[in-house]
Image (tube, rainbow, N blue to C red):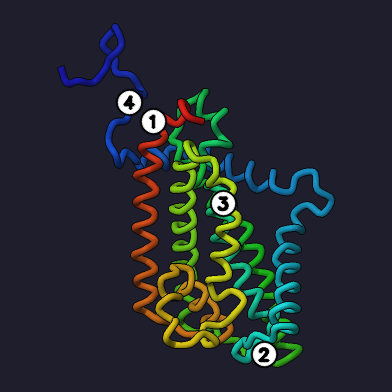
Amino acid sequence: MNGEPTKADGVKWDKVMRPRSDWFDIHPGEIWRYRDLIALFVWRDFVSVYKQTILGPLWFILQPLLTTIVFTFIFGSVAKFPTDGVPPFLFYLSGVIVWRYFADCMSSTSNTFVTNAHIFGKVYFPRLTVPVSVVISNLIAFGIQFLLFLACLVYSSLSQGVAIHPGASVLLLPVLIFQMALLGLGFGIVVSSMTTRYRDLTHLVGFGLQLWMFMTPVVYSTSSIPVKLHWILALNPMTPVIEIFRYTFLGTGFIDVHSWLVSLATTICVLLVGILLFSKVEKSFMDTV
């Protein structure tokens, strides 16, 4: 007896499913085996966002553009927030596309259990594949908006002489994107795990993300904040991400290695807490959803 279940003729089963009992019961290899399902979810999420709309995928470009135009008018022309010598439109667009990727990852994954309960209750597959697919589908939208930013940057360089600063820090871009994905995924699955019992959190996510955005240097530069208050900005894990992104492409801001390391450590902690809660809740969420 080796403990492995077998058929009546002694042949081992191809697939054996057992109840999960550990706190950290996540198997990356199992998620990888379901990569085809993840690809289907990614396509579903990407296509369904603007399905049956007149402008369709153009909304991936129009949304950050319209948001940036409003920010440029309100914070650039009316409030006259300093942008460290960078054209306001480029300054706000850089902050908007970075923030949107993180915010979309978090808000989209925060309803994983509630919106997919009808699927989870019928068939088995690793539940974590759903939020992972959401992060990947949002990455496609971020790629489109990043190309928009590069096009605006090149146009401003040719028409207005705006200097382009793609230094060695551009190599950090994949790391920044990966960090944003993990941070959005971590916070999203934490909220998703808690909304199975406390639905109020669903309504607080959008409001909380708006407040969080204004606590992040999206519409203002860090240099406009008194130095004695910089420690507050350093508590925000998204602050170093936006600062490094702007430093890489616009030459403004700075790279504070210490703050970034703290931000990376915060990201890992949030993700681990999220996986722990997700692993615990997925065993019994059908009783509460």
Which residue is depicted at the point 48% across and 87% down? 226
Where 113 falls versus 76 (above or below)? above
Q: Which residue is mark 2?
A: 162
SS under mark 2: loop
Q: How dense is the environment of label 1, judged by Cα within 10 Å: few (below 14), some, or many (20 and up)?
A: few
Q: CA distance from mark 4 to mark 2?
A: 59 Å
Q: CA distance from mark 1 to mark 3?
A: 25 Å
**Is 131 displayed left or right of 77 in the figure?**
left
Lower sequence index among marks 4 and 2 = 4
Lower sequence index among marks 1 and 4 = 4
Q: How dense is the environment of label 2, judged by Cα within 10 Å: few (below 14), some, or many (20 and up)?
A: some
Q: Position of residue 69 (x, y in %)?
A: 75, 73
Lower sequence index among marks 2 and 1 = 2
Q: Nearer the viewer, mark 3 or mark 2?
A: 3
Q: Which residue is mark 4?
A: 19
Where 179 falls versus 75 (above or below)? above
- From the viewer's side, name the closer residue of 75 and 27: 75
Q: Which residue is mark 3?
A: 204
- From the viewer's side, name the closer residue of 230 and 41: 230
Which residue is depicted at the point 71% across and 72% down? 68
Which residue is depicted at the point 46% across and 80% down? 169
Q: CA distance from mark 2 to mark 1?
A: 54 Å
